Image (cartoon, grey):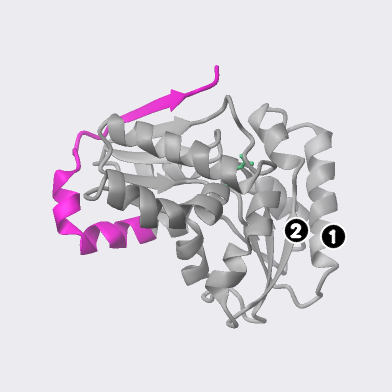
Amino acid sequence: MIGFFDSGIGGLSILREATCRLPQYSYLYFADQARAPYGNQSADEIYQFTEEGVNRLFQEGCELVILACNTASAVALRRLQQEFLPQRFPDRRVLGIVQPTVEELLKYTKSRVVGLLATSATVRSGMYEEKLGNSVLLLTQACPLLVPIIESGSHENNEFREAARGYIQELLAKDDRIDTVILGCTHYGLVADVFRELVPPSIYVLSQGELVISSLFQYLKRHEELEKRLKKEGRVLMITTGK
Ligand code: DGL
């Protein structure tokens, strides 16, 4: 199977694209809802939780795991790839979603001034800036109130809209040349329409689902050996540590 990992329901915004565009594969989705949100926790905790989740997905038979979570991708991916995989699962793979987002970004921005809405941990990690280098000026805004509201299913309330509006205003006030805003948390991708309503129409709102799946498709084409080991039964299973 292909495993998908997130702290909660956010990664479903990526899984949805996977099941539409690559329906032949079997997917196992793991949501660590008992410990969500990750975005306000320390880097050590985020690493620990992510390693446990990935370990579980491997134990359940996944050959490849996508960290469908920016926070885990930004904070934990490198150490998983450099230490955990070589020591424990040398023939399995873990991919993140920051790199594919950054690779596609230049197709969208003309001004090369881009805004990032994300969790506090993703912003603190500086991973987007590191991957972008000098190609783009990135302005960031942490949005700590949003994931708990989305996770509780009450994002249709005014509270969510008002919090999102406030964060967007703060971000856009940082530089009036911003022409693209990255929804750099997969939870936001679930409610991308709300962000699109709140951001001025001249600014492009980039949600990650499609970008990440195009990149996964390319990855599988390049790694035939791994692709051959994947089941083609078109099943989707889900595990949560919560309710
Ligand atoms: N969906 C996640 C992300 O993309 C994690 C959000 C959280 O748990 O704070 O960052």
Drawn side of residue 102 relative to residue 134, left or right: left
Find residue 144 and report its image quarter. top right
Dot 1, crowdedness within 10 Å: few (<14), some or many (≥20)? some
Q: What residue did someone put label 2 on?
A: 141
Q: What amino acid type is highlighted by mark number 1? A: Glu
> Is label 2 or label 1 in front?
2
Residue 217, magenta (yes or no): yes
Query: Which segment is the magenta one?
Result: 215-243
Dot 2, crowdedness within 10 Å: few (<14), some or many (≥20)? many
Q: Position of residue 212 (x, y in %)?
A: 43, 56
CB within 8 Å, label 2 to label 1: yes
Between 78 and 95, the residue placed more toward the observer is 78
Look at the numbered disc 1 and give the secondary structure of its residue. helix
The quarter of the rendered structure image containing the C terminus is top right
Q: Residue at x 55, y 53 (%)?
A: 75
Going from the N terminus, do you reach mark 2 or mark 1 first?
2
